[in-house]
Image: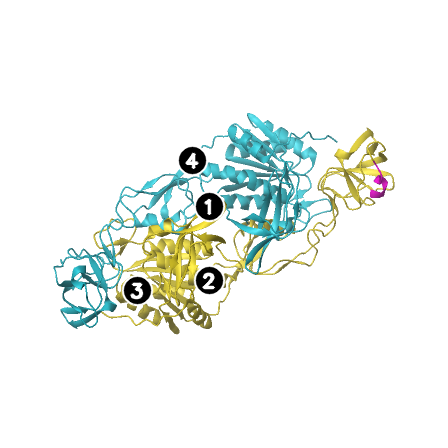
Chain colours: A cyan, B yellow
Amino acid sequence: MTTELFTVQTPPDAWALLTRHFQPHRQTERIATAEALDRVLAEELLSPQDLPEFPRSTVDGYAVNAADTYGATPGLPAFLSVVGEVPMGQRAAIEIAAGEAAVVHTGGMIPPGANAVVMVEYTQQVDEASIEVMQPVSEGQGIIQIGEDIRRGMSVMEPGRRLRPQDIGGLMALGITEVTVARPPRVGIISTGDEVVPPNQAVEPGQVRDINSYTLSALTERAGGVPVRYGIIPDNRDALEQAARQGHAECDILVFTAGSSVSYRDMTADVIASLGEPGVLVHGVSVKPGKPTILAVCDGKPVFGLPGNPVSAMVIFDLFITPVVSALLGVNTPPRPQLAARLARNIASDTGREDYVQVRLETRDTELWAVPVLGKSNLIYTLVNAQGIVKVPLDSNGIRAGEWVTVTLY
Amino acid sequence: MTTELFTVQTPPDAWALLTRHFQPHRQTERIATAEALDRVLAEELLSPQDLPEFPRSTVDGYAVNAADTYGATPGLPAFLSVVGEVPMGQRAAIEIAAGEAAVVHTGGMIPPGANAVVMVEYTQQVDEASIEVMQPVSEGQGIIQIGEDIRRGMSVMEPGRRLRPQDIGGLMALGITEVTVARPPRVGIISTGDEVVPPNQAVEPGQVRDINSYTLSALTERAGGVPVRYGIIPDNRDALEQAARQGHAECDILVFTAGSSVSYRDMTADVIASLGEPGVLVHGVSVKPGKPTILAVCDGKPVFGLPGNPVSAMVIFDLFITPVVSALLGVNTPPRPQLAARLARNIASDTGREDYVQVRLETRDTELWAVPVLGKSNLIYTLVNAQGIVKVPLDSNGIRAGEWVTVTLY
């Protein structure tokens, strides 16, 4: 039995080492805006036009000169001649002079000469061609002015934005029906370990089903990448090296979820080292759970060896691989929201180590509490029963019950 | 010009009316667990086995009888005979007697007779067949017991859970490779209005591009439904009725994003009324923005007429349609996270009306502040520039700057 010599690094040091050797080459593609939900914008977009390009009514009513309504009351209404109606979807063909009004609908164009719209509720029809206005309007009331939503030439969205429903709407409003977005990075996932069998298989004593291929695939999707599963590779140096070469060639990021024992980890480290320069950068991080982690860059591509235990694998994925996917996407918002809650129970830790604790959320009175989920850190059901995770910082030796903590939601 | 007679309802009353006439008929389908990310579970799952089914080591080391190590120190180590190694992925063939130890790897099976594992770091090899143990272990240390993660027959997940990466892992661990999930409801979206043109088209004065078909499609996806767009229907009763009948027949929910003027709204209400009983239930809700909203149930299917302005349409979608999609999915978690922040500016409102205010988030010192986004409530870019939304409750006449509010994130 060989003893592994860990050269354990703190997470910030490990990340600094990784980014020193890894320059993300962002790749882009051009797609229809209608298909761009949750994609990351890779260009700055300037507005090709004013929005709106013509003054529009925000209400149903009458386009008027505001001055004609000043002082109007129900007892002493202003009397105006109705000179026509602005049809929806068409240029206003009429012009309004003093003492005149035109019927306009919500969203319709304001005719030249008018500078306000009186809501129909504040008018009364006298006959076919005249109305009484019972309440004054000020200049600009009931109108969206040219360019009030956005001005021509303005920057409407910056690169790095993950597009939401309203962003797609904002682009459509400007006629921007195609956008350049980041191509999602491909994340190759290789599972190893003689004890690991496919999930659809019965397990014999000593065996476990493959969990990590599937949780890491789903985490990859959540992060904005495309998972590529290479299956379970037998514990055999040649087979592992062959799968590794293929994954390294085909993907932007390669992830091993190695068997959990030292000998597997050593073999994985050897195989990673063979994939290219500079090779393994970090072998062991001061994170609980997740210490036996390998960080590498091989010929410009980040390569990771994750612990076999599913909780560690998930913690380390979020700590290092999600940020690498984000860097390749150029995204400037985190994929998972955070919120503040009070810690329900003391958490002990050691300084010099980051601890990640699974929590449930509970509302007590009106306050949100984060309740640590009990259970050994390598049980998949501690994750299943958790709603989020709390980090105990490197320089802390624990967090007291009652303190406010940041919960990153699942 | 006709004046619409609103029978305005509060949002809770409107919702109560809707749910009185709408019984969600949940439909399910059976899919591969590997493809089930973000899908909603529609069955209760019981564990078909103990997890693990055999005691497993959590460390690399030696399986021992804990009693043999009591009192061991580096100066006075316990001396044990190594009787073999448990190979990964196989049943432990050896048995441990007093004074004996066996090599085990992380994740490996604990051999019969052993009740603890000493980490390799606390041992020293004497020769091929014997070790010294420098530190005592207690019974159960270094071991995950049978069923410690989950017990056979236990409920592992309830219906209504939206499956996350770790949930998929938890199911795979138990060999549950297929699951019954809710079939995503189909949401038909019909855009109307003579002023509305497709986004790829140049706009003439008086025209606007179709925004709502696309934001509502994206919101439908976010909610867990499948959007079906029926395009922009000309302002013509026959054409609208034909599209409405097709959408009502093909979808589970039908949404009109009507032209914004009264005449369109009236026509939409007429067409909705013709789709089936009981027809229109609510015509107008006390929500700002979003008042001119139609809620209906026609032959068992919910039908909505949304205001034409994109901000109102989005607010009302989240207020009524997202919950209907959730009801059809049977999901028990909200699709969008919420957090607490302090309001940066006074918001005025009227009692008897719910107001929805777009906000940006800003961290000042360590506190999160919700800063209302200025701009008229019908400008799409107030939404684009917002990170979330704050509700001013029905019975409130406003919220003061500095108060804590709940922000629903986009």
N-terminal of the pair, mark 3 or mark 1, is 3
| Residue that label 2 marks | B323
Expressed as whole percent of the image width and height from the top left, the position of residue A386 reads 60, 52
Element marked by disc 3: helix
Range drawn in magenta: B65-72
Query: Which one is in front in this view, the residue at disc 3 or the one at disc 1?
Result: 1
Q: Which residue is drawn at 35% across and 56% down?
A: B311
In the displayed structure, B181 sits above or below A229; it is below
Q: Do labels 1 and 4 share a chain?
A: no
Q: Marks 2 and 3, how far apart in space?
A: 26 Å
Query: Which one is in front in this view, the residue at disc 2 or the one at disc 4?
Result: 2
Residue at the bottom extreme? B278
Q: Marks 3 and 4, how far apart in space?
A: 44 Å
Query: Which one is in front in this view, the residue at disc 3 or the one at disc 4?
Result: 4
| Residue that label 1 marks | B363
In the displayed structure, B92 sits above or below B30; it is above
| Residue that label 4 marks | A27
Expressed as whole percent of the image width and height from the top left, the position of residue B181 reads 54, 58
N-terminal of the pair, mark 2 or mark 3, is 3
Tell me which chain the residue with mark 4 is part of: A
Q: Marks 3 and 1, how far apart in space?
A: 48 Å
Residue type, label 3: Leu
Q: How crowded is mark 3: few (under 14 residues within 10 Å), some or many (20 or more)?
A: many
State whether residue A21 appears in this view: no
